């Protein structure tokens, strides 16, 4: 199976050089035109690593295990994965809602009068 847009296999690197090799961090900005691209979208201070951070933070909010995050990120240590498992107001509310649902299910779901 290939990506419909690039015709590349799913495991292919997203950003590659002219020969199709993965772009290494030392020359990433030059080879991708990063500075021009972020300036064009009005975000000149955006760093390439910000994409990794955002992606990993969003992945952590899908309630996957730390081990799953480690595998996705290519990390051997849980320390790096834990950085992305930030508590957020949205996640806290989701947890509270799910706990309420569980408790309602155990107690019959009705309001109790005091």
Image (spheres, rainbow, N blue to C red):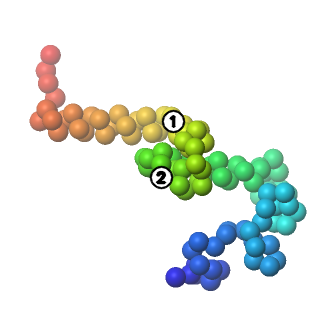
In the displayed structure, does residue 7 sit left or right of residue 65? right
Residue located beneath label 1 in the image? 88
* Residue 31 occupies quadrant: bottom right
Disc 1 is placed on an element classified as loop
In the displayed structure, does residue 87 sit left or right of residue 6? left
Q: Which mark is residue 71?
A: none
Q: Nearer the viewer, residue 53 or 21?
A: 21
In the displayed structure, does residue 7 sit left or right of residue 20? left
Give me the residue at 84% from left, 57% from top. Answer: 26
Q: Nearer the viewer, residue 23 or 75?
A: 75
* Residue 72 occupies quadrant: bottom right
Dot 2 and dot 1 residues touching (CB under 8 Å):
no
Label 1 crowd (10 A; few <14 / some 14-19 / many >=20): few
Image quadrant containing the C terminus: top left
Residue located beneath label 2 in the image? 68
Disc 2/disc 1 C-alpha distance (Å): 20 Å
* Residue 84 occupies quadrant: top right
Q: Give the image location of residue 46, x and y in percent.
A: 77, 49
Farthest right residue in view = 30
Give me the residue at 76% from left, 73% from top. Answer: 21
């Amino acid at each position: 199976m290939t990506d419909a847009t690039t015709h590349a296999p799913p495991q292919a690197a997203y950003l590659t050089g002219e020969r199709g090799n993965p772009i290494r961090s030392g020359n990433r900005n030059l080879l991708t035109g990063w500075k021009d691209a972020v300036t064009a979208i009005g975000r000149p201070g955006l760093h390439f690593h910000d994409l990794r951070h955002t992606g990993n933070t969003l992945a952590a909010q899908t309630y996957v295990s730390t081990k799953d995050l480690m595998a996705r990120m290519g990390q051997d240590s849980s320390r790096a994965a834990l950085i992305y498992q930030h508590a957020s107001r949205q996640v806290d509310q989701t947890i509270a809602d799910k706990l309420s649902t569980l408790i309602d299910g155990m107690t019959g779901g009705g309001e109790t009068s005091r």
